[in-house]
Image (cartoon, helix red, strand yellow):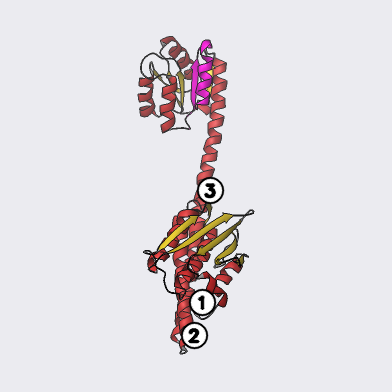
Amino acid sequence: MNSATKKTVLVIDDDETVLAVLSGFLNMLGYEVKTALSGDVGWELFQSEKPDAILSDLLMPGGLDGLALLAKIRTVNPLLPFIVVSGKSDVDEAMTAIRKGAWDFIVKPVGFEQLSTILHRVWERASLLAMRRDYQTQLEAEIASRTAELHHRVKNNLQVILILLDLQRENTHNAEARELLWESQNRIHAMAEIQEQAFQEEHNGHVDLRPFLTGLVFHLVNALGWTPVLTLDWDIPPLEIEAGAAFSIGLILNEIIATVLETELTQPEKASLSVKLTPGPPQSFELTVEDSWGAIKTWQTEQGSLSMSITMLKVLTELVEGQLKYDRRTPNRITVSIFHDRSPSLL
């Protein structure tokens, strides 16, 4: 039969008569057959012969019984068809084996047609599983390819922006304008670093949000010299989201934290900063940041370099069609609504 071409079936039973009957039927069906009189020998043959399916008795004295053998094989090859051969009195054990991962069971005495039907059903299921596995592999490869392409395009465009800003700064003689262009370059550099980190941490197109955001903030706190005095309070759920959306949230959080830590106030001896990310309606979050020393409270004046920081934050928020909110009752708190299916257009 075509379905049995080059397929090998391993038969395990402590009864030589049962082995002979099953081997004869399988040979008639066109299979290559390997036999074992114990679970231990069956395990050795499984490792050396790499069979396409296993027919195994459950109750075998000494060494590995059928259930123990099934458990060992599933740790190595969970998708290998494992068919239980049981006596009429062992049906309960056979059902236990099914719950533990066996594909099917057959009751002794085994008939030719019965065995042929079960194997046909097993190969159909194995074929469907292989198709699904191949499709999943292909899908993951396609996602990885598209993510890499997106990463490359964004990186190139950020580099172009940096070059243009640098050229403009070199040809500008106004000190205030040069300072603004320099600040813009610093922000683009920060964007590039966040984008690089987001796409480095992505898996199948998604990023684990909590370690990504906490790592970003810890880097800023350390770089700006706040580590000795600042306590961080986190409320970020364990969640994986699309890499582009993680990039959007990272940009906004980076701008908030950098502006808070760079606000021209005397650095306190002790300070705390809380970061909270709350999932909202579908495809949205609320990002809330609160400081203990009054930096956010000064933002409403939007003076000097602070004005540019707030402008940048507003632009990033608008890119995700979000909303920037201050709480008058808690002036040291800022909240940004973020729709994570809309990421900044840098392509």
Q: Secondary structure at mark 1?
A: helix
Question: Nearer the N terminus, badge 3 or badge 1?
Answer: 3
| Residues in magenta, as a range | 79-100
| Left or right: 37 as drawn, with respect to 151 | left
Residue behind mark 1: 306
Residue behind mark 3: 139
From this viewpoint, is residue 153 visible? no
Q: Residue at (54%, 43%) from the top-left corner?
A: 135
Q: CA distance from mark 2 to mark 3?
A: 48 Å
Q: Which mark is residue 289?
A: none
From this viewpoint, is residue 288 visible? yes
| Left or right: 108 as drawn, with respect to 227 | right
Number of numbered discs on residues: 3
Q: Marks 1 and 3: in contact by CB < 8 Å?
A: no
Residue behind mark 2: 177
Q: Amino acid at mark 3?
A: Leu
Question: Where is residue 141 shown, x and y percent of the image?
Answer: 49, 50
